[in-house]
């Protein structure tokens, strides 16, 4: 398979970047912040109630630790604006008399924020303590620094089993880990006990291969030790957009994906955020992770599609067989007929598609047969030797009977021309005839039949609209286009016969023309396909077309014609789709019929058969 070349050569500073073929494993220190170097501030609060709405802080206790050593402590009572309830006094031992001379939270909070600056906050049931601190910051007009937060309750639930402790309360865990301080609902005592619990939990996860802050923050018992050890594969990825390929020990691709940030996206496969069973299985088999840095998101999507089509990774579910498209073919013979095929040949037949499934293609064929009296027999007919018997379609007026010589080649050619026009040109005549049938069925309250016919009509219109949209792009020798990049500058693409031949980005504030010239010079050479074929998979051409039709995209240069047939399927679809989406099978069906199309001169009669 040809690869997509996106190297750029332009005057002045090189607009591209060299892409290393491999990425080396970084040192241990590059993988994250070692836990021994992290400063933790373990905090505990006593309050007048269980919620910051209507309750206030009465005591703050905090211990600063790093590498298992205590660096400092902070303890102070806080004078609340409301009296302390009696049951709180019983629980904590803090009375109104004890806090009457204490400083208010407006004085205490800045001291705590300074004490905790640059640290990771730790608390037992951290949501409770952090919510009170955030509320106090908002009340006193202090911006909340956005500390990283670690909850010892969450960790304990994954590391401490029921046979070790009856529950995950601080007192139970303090006993389990042999804390030197007994928690007693006083802030500093509870903070000291939480320090010992933290150290006990960190020791346990260390035995499971967790050695950095980032690993500790994302730790989950659902992530196996083997899966966690493979995190190093993602740590080596660049922070750039592109495609990533997981491979097994033999180098066979297991899974291909895209990302705007390769490192950030692939790291999620080694954390609890990845809940898909098949992905967990895939990571267990993966031995390497290959990054392919791309200039634009479109290039990444195209590369992903091509790699999946080439290797068919077993853990990819989408686009594994994009080459297996389904088409409707109007055969090239004396008496043409419609057929559903898996490939487009280099012949004089007319094709519509690709369809999403064989069922949709067959529905479109049935819709055409409803209003265009084409033959439906499968044998090849000769004008000189017609058959001796006809099928029932001749008797009911749904076919002219060329099989028995009842219809001349010239007369049948007019019928075939109507079908061909519906596939590659205007669909207005066929859609108008189908709508007349729909309205008649609705008047007769045959709603199920009407719904079936509606589905067939929409399958025809959607597929022919798709085919007509793709055709100008697949027949153009070259299309160069640009779109504003989010970070400034321009995303640039070069498309040849519907295939993405090159992609680039011009920096912000720089003339993009030299980059466009370099892109065209270095883009992939694409041989012109035959009239009926495309140089790319239909799904790739559709990705490119979707990009070209996106807001802000501009055509820079066009070698070819960018046209769609007047009255084509796109116009019909735009009118029919809203009504199709709201269709009902009840007695209200007629009210949900698509708005009528104006039937042009020469349209098929409503009862054409």
Image (cartoon, rainbow, N blue to C red):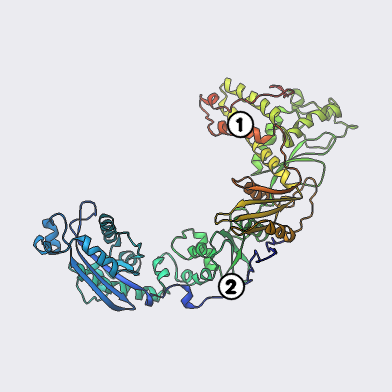
Q: Is residue 188 above or below residue 311?
A: below
Residue 165: percent from the left, percent from the top?
A: 27, 69
For label 1, count other residues whose C-alpha is less than 10 Å away and answer few (under 14), some (14-19) or many (20+): some
**For residue 191, side relative to residue 609 (left or right):** left
Quadrant in which the N terminus is drawn: bottom right
Residue 42, picture quadrant: bottom left
Where does residue 245 sit, x and y in percent of width and height?
Answer: 59, 64
Q: Is residue 578 above or below residue 356?
A: above
Towards the viewer: 382 or 289: 289
In percent of the image, x 65 and y 57: which residue is there?
511
50 vs 101, left or right, is right
Please say if 393 is above or below 459. Answer: above
Upstream in the sequence, badge 2 or badge 1? 2
Tell whether 189 sits left or right of 324. Answer: left
Q: Residue furthest right?
A: 384
Residue at the location (55% across, 59% down)? 260
Q: Which residue is mark 1?
A: 575
Question: Residue at coordinates 35% horizontally, 66% vertically from top-left?
Answer: 158
Front one among 401 and 603: 603
Secondary structure of the residue carrying numbered label 2: loop
Q: Which residue is mark 2?
A: 23
């Amino acid at each position: 398979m040809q690869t997509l070349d996106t190297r750029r050569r332009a005057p002045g500073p090189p607009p591209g970047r060299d892409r290393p073929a491999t990425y080396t494993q970084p040192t241990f220190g590059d993988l994250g912040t070692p836990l021994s170097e992290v400063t933790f501030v373990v905090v505990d609060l006593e309050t007048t109630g269980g919620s910051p709405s209507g309750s206030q802080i009465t005591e703050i206790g905090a211990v600063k630790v790093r590498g298992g050593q205590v660096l400092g402590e902070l303890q102070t009572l806080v004078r609340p604006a409301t009296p302390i309830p009696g049951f709180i006094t019983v629980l904590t031992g803090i009375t109104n008399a004890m806090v009457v001379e204490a400083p208010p939270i407006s004085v205490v909070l800045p001291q705590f924020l300074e004490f905790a600056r640059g640290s990771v906050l730790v608390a037992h049931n951290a949501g409770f303590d952090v919510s009170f601190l955030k509320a106090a910051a908002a009340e006193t007009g202090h911006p909340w620094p956005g500390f990283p937060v670690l909850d010892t309750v969450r960790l304990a639930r994954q590391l401490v089993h029921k046979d070790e402790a009856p529950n995950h309360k601080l007192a139970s865990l303090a006993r389990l880990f042999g804390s030197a301080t007994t928690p007693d609902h006083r802030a500093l005592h509870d903070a000291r006990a939480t320090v010992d619990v933290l150290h006990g939990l960190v020791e346990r996860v260390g035995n499971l291969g967790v050695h950095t802050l980032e690993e500790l923050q994302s730790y989950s018992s659902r992530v196996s030790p083997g899966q966690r050890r493979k995190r190093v594969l993602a740590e080596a990825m660049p922070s750039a957009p592109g495609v990533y390929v997981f491979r097994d020990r033999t180098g066979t691709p297991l899974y291909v994906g895209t990302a705007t940030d390769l490192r950030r996206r692939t790291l999620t496969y080694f954390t609890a955020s990845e809940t898909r069973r098949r992905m967990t299985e895939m990571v267990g088999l993966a031995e390497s992770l290959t990054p392919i840095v791309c200039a634009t998101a479109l290039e990444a999507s195209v590369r992903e599609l091509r790699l999946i089509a080439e290797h068919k990774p077993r853990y990819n579910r989408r686009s594994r067989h994009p080459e297996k498209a389904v088409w409707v073919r109007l055969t090239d013979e004396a008496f043409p007929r419609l057929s559903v095929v898996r490939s487009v040949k280099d012949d004089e037949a007319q094709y519509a598609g690709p369809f999403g499934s064989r069922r949709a293609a067959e529905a479109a064929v049935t819709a055409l047969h409803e209003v265009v009296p084409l033959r439906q027999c499968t044998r090849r007919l000769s004008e000189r030797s017609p058959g001796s018997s006809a099928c029932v379609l001749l008797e009911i007026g749904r076919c002219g009977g060329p099989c028995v010589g009842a219809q001349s080649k010239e007369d049948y050619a007019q019928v075939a021309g109507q079908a061909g026009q519906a596939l590659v040109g205007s669909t207005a005549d066929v859609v108008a005839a189908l709508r007349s049938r729909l309205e008649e069925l609705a008047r007769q309250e045959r709603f199920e039949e009407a719904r079936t016919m509606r589905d067939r009509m929409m399958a025809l219109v959607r597929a022919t609209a798709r085919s007509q949209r793709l055709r100008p792009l697949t027949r153009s020798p070259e299309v160069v286009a640009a779109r504003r990049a989010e970070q400034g500058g321009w995303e640039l693409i070069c498309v040849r016969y519907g295939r993405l031949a090159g992609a680039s980005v011009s920096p912000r504030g720089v003339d993009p023309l030299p980059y466009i010239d370099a892109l065209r010079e270095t883009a992939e050479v694409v041989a012109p396909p035959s009239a009926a074929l495309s140089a790319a998979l239909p799904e790739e051409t559709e990705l490119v077309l979707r990009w070209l039709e996106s807001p802000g995209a501009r055509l820079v240069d066009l070698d070819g014609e960018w046209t769609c047939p007047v009255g084509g399927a796109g116009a019909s679809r735009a009118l029919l789709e809203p009504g199709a989406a709201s269709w009902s099978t009840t007695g209200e069906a007629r009210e949900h019929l698509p708005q009528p199309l104006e039937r042009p001169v020469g349209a098929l009669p409503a009862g054409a058969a």
